[in-house]
Image (cartoon, rainbow, N blue to C red):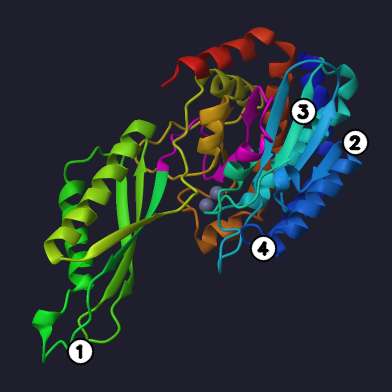
Amino acid sequence: MSAVKELIAAAVDRVADELEALSHRIHGHPELAYQEFKAAEWLSDFLVGQGFKVERGAGGVETAFRAILETGEGPTIAILCEYDALPEIGHACGHNVIATAGVGAGAALAAVRDRLPAGRIHVVGTPAEEGGGGKLRLIRAGTFRGVDAAMMVHGWDRWVPHQDLLGIVRLGLEFTGKAAHAAADPWDGVNAVDAIVQTFNNVSMLRQQIRPDARIHGIITSGGAAPNIIPEFAAATFYVRAARLDYLAELRRRVIACAEGAALATGCSVKVVEAETAYEPMKRNQTLADAFRSNMQRLGLPESPEMKDRLGSSDVGNVSQVLPAIQPYVRIAPDGTPWHSRAFAEAAASPLAREGMLAAAKVMAMTTLDLLSDPGLLARAQEEFRAAP
Ligand SMILES: [Zn+2]
Ligand SMILES: [Zn+2]
């Protein structure tokens, strides 16, 4: 098998310049969630050129794709790409690197297709990670049905095979009261901003009693029309995050209770408007993470410890709740570069990003080869998935 891994590494190196050019092209044309038409087209075209059969608009999502390479009846391994950018600051999450690492892994596997064990490789283009929940739509559409394991990478300033991700629920809270002249007849009014203030106070007290890895944070999105009118309407949006699905459900319930208590105290009514795109926590799969790690070691890549107190959220969490999945982190930025910053955007098109992208492509392709070659490895990953909470 190690001979095939040598060929995989060589295959990535052969397309290195092309992958970097593709990464820079995506980086130079940042497209927001569900608007990633160019990126999806360029990535799909690249995979067609490597011998993949590509379904554009997979799962009924216009900017998604699914590229398939089949070598016979066997397991199906998915490699996921993201390519959406952020408003105003472009590719400050480095999704151009995620995309090209994914298609680079696909290219390497296609290059050794005659030596691959029987099975299927899906390179899946998943739009709108930054809030739009593209992977949820693909899960609902059945795009991941029949997939035995999935992997993707994300850029950072270090290599880490597993990091937890917090699940997130987005709650809109809309309070309705009654308008009145704020000086002449305040007693006739029902103050919706008071309900908002009370909600924030209730949540602040709740926050003292929650687990350290949970997060609750909100903003006021509507806070009255003019000071001389008792506000008849006010609204806030809260994000509730937790590392486990059951605790996320509990905190969601308690934040809604904070709003209901505020409504009761002020005499307002409250409507809870919940976003459909709830991101679920990442379900750890140590078997897959270890397989990834051993290929990292093969390439001499340095590993950093898991970080327990700097946690984000992603829709890859939802994927990890329906099948064994990993999202290891790849060094593409100088030490200490924070995500969603202009410095991270700059790093995502630097020589360090090229280095990380190519190494990640190799490690993902090698890990896919391991999963196709060793039925015991895939069975252990699936057994761990079934046993985990
Ligand atoms: Zn991001
Ligand atoms: Zn990201």
**Which kind of residue does numbered mark 4 sit on?**
Pro
Residue at position x 69%, y 36% in the image: 143
Task: Say if disc 1 is inside 8 Å of ligand 1.
Answer: no
Estimate the spatial distance between the alpha carbons at disc 3 and disc 2, rounded to whole Å.
12 Å
In this view, the mark in front (4 or 3): 3
Q: Which residue is mark 3?
A: 121
In this view, the mark in front (4 or 1): 1
Estimate the spatial distance between the alpha carbons at disc 4 and disc 1, rounded to whole Å.
44 Å
Q: Which residue is mark 4?
A: 30
Q: Which residue is mark 1?
A: 228
Marks 2 and 4, the one that precedes in the sequence: 4
Q: Main secondary structure of the magenta part?
A: loop
Residue in front for this viewpoint, 388 or 173: 173
- Residue 51 is tagged as 2
Whether residue 327 can be seen here: no
In the rendered image, the vertical position of residue 370 relative to residue 209, given as above or below? above
Span of residues in magenta:
139-167
In the rendered image, the vertical position of residue 372 relative to residue 248, given as above or below? above
State the count of labels: 4
Task: Give the secondary structure at mark 4.
Answer: loop
Estimate the spatial distance between the alpha carbons at disc 2 and disc 4, rounded to whole Å.
27 Å
Estimate the spatial distance between the alpha carbons at disc 1 and disc 3, rounded to whole Å.
64 Å
